[in-house]
Amino acid sequence: MNINELIAIIKKKLEEKIVIEKIKIEDKSFLHKNHPGNQKDKFHLVVEIESNELKKVSKINSNRKIYDILDKELKNFIHSIQLKIN
């Protein structure tokens, strides 16, 4: 899977399950290119979400909800994900 396909899938899945005002997903894989353990087909992502729904719950619960939604992608295509919820 390429990064553009992955970003589109992530946006679609999150927007189907969470009320999101704004979402931005950045590929930061290039920052980890030469690190030990880096896998070619797994990505490092930063996901910024503006969501009143997620702000109403604890950070742990909002992160858990996102991880549950993206379970397949996390197991197969994402090496690292940084969540920023506003």
Image: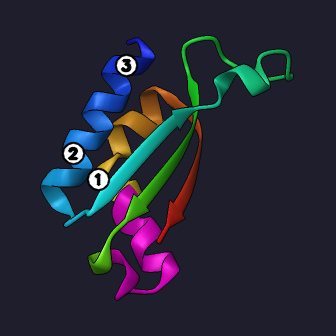
Q: Is residue 60 or residue 12 the one in the foreground?
A: 12
Percent x, y for residue 33?
77, 16
- Residue lying at the far front of the rendered structure: 22
In the rendered structure, the answer to whether residue 36 lies left or right of residue 62 reads right
**Which three-letter amino acid code belongs to the residue tagged 2?**
Lys
Residue 67 found in image quarter:
bottom left
The residue located at (17%, 59%) in the rendering is 17
The residue located at (36%, 26%) in the rendering is 6
Residue 40 found in image quarter:
top right
Q: Nearer the viewer, mark 2 or mark 1?
A: 2
Instruction: Please say if the residues under marks 2 and 1 sit with CB atoms less than 8 Å apart.
Output: yes
Percent x, y for residue 23?
36, 51
Alpha carbon distance from label 2 to label 1: 7 Å
**Dot 2 or dot 1, earlier in sequence:** 2
In the rendered structure, the answer to whether residue 34 lies left or right of residue 56 reads right
Please give the residue where the numbered disc 3 appears in the rendered image. 4
Q: Is residue 68 or residue 19 the one in the foreground?
A: 19
Mark 1 crowdedness (10 Å alpha carbons): few <14, some 14-19, many ≥20 = some
Tell me how the rendering is colored: rainbow
Please give the residue where the numbered disc 2 appears in the rendered image. 13
Please give the residue where the numbered disc 1 appears in the rendered image. 69
**Dot 3 or dot 2, earlier in sequence:** 3
Q: Which residues are magenta?
A: 54-66
**Dot 1 or dot 3, earlier in sequence:** 3
Residue 28, above or below 60: above
Residue 26, above or below 4: below
Instruction: Please say if the residues under marks 3 and 2 sit with CB atoms less than 8 Å apart.
Output: no
